Image (spheres, helix red, strand yellow):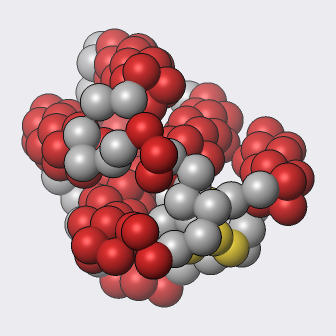
Amino acid sequence: MNTKLQQIFDSLETQRNQLFTSLNNLTAQKLNQQPQNGWSINQVIAHLITAERLSILYLHKKIQAINEVENSGLIEELKMIVLIISQRLPFKFKAPKVVVENTKSSTSLQELEQEWTTVRNELKIVLEKFNDDQIKRKIYKHVVAGKLNIRQTLLFFREHVIHHQQQIKRLL
């Protein structure tokens, strides 16, 4: 795997492991307690998993024709900065319909951790398919930011977790 992608992937795994470590001592009741008009902690985790799983399926499809896609540039870097800022602010965003429709309603934290491990293993397989000269190719389509390269995609995954960690802290 490309060194830069490996570094980001490793940081994503550290972030994920720290999240589960912070939640492991909570009761099932606390993890599944759903506030009015909101998600429980387990639903937030399920949402993050579903978003990544669907993104990986999209990447599997798009990597087949990666050499036909143009490289990202300054515009995508600027969009990425705006995307990062938006994820760090305490605003609510409506999840894409396809993510909501494919998110499990309830499961245990242990099952969620196992599922996310499986999803991350799939992500690693996809990342290993990228040649160094393909890293800047616009391969992922974010619902708001538009086309991003694989490095930017991984950075979005990181920011997406950070965004929802704030939500989890409010639920605690």
| Residue at point 49%, 66% (across, down) | 139
| Residue at point 54%, 60% (across, down) | 137
| Residue at point 60%, 70% (across, down) | 70
Picture mark count: 0
Compared with 58, 153 (above or below) is: above
Q: Quadrant of the C terminus?
A: top right
Front residue of 14 and 153: 153
Q: Position of residue 133 (x, y in %)?
A: 47, 46
Front residue of 100 and 106: 100
Compared with 36, 162 (above or below) is: above
Compared with 170, 74 (above or below) is: below
Specify the quadrant of the image occupied by residue 79.
Answer: bottom right
Front residue of 121 and 171: 121
Q: Is residue 110 rendered to the left or right of residue 153?
A: left
Q: Is residue 80 rendered to the left or right of residue 121?
A: right
Q: Position of residue 16 (x, y in %)?
A: 38, 27
Q: Quadrant of the N terminus?
A: top left
Specify the quadrant of the image occupied by residue 59.
Answer: bottom left
Q: Position of residue 125 (x, y in %)?
A: 18, 44
Q: Is residue 111 rendered to the left or right of residue 159?
A: left
Compared with 131, 16 (above or below) is: above
| Residue at point 77%, 56% (across, down) | 73
Front residue of 58 and 66: 66
Is residue 37 in view from this perspective?
no
Q: Position of residue 156 (x, y in %)?
A: 60, 47
Q: Is residue 108 rendered to the left or right of residue 164?
A: left
Is residue 124 in view from this perspective?
yes
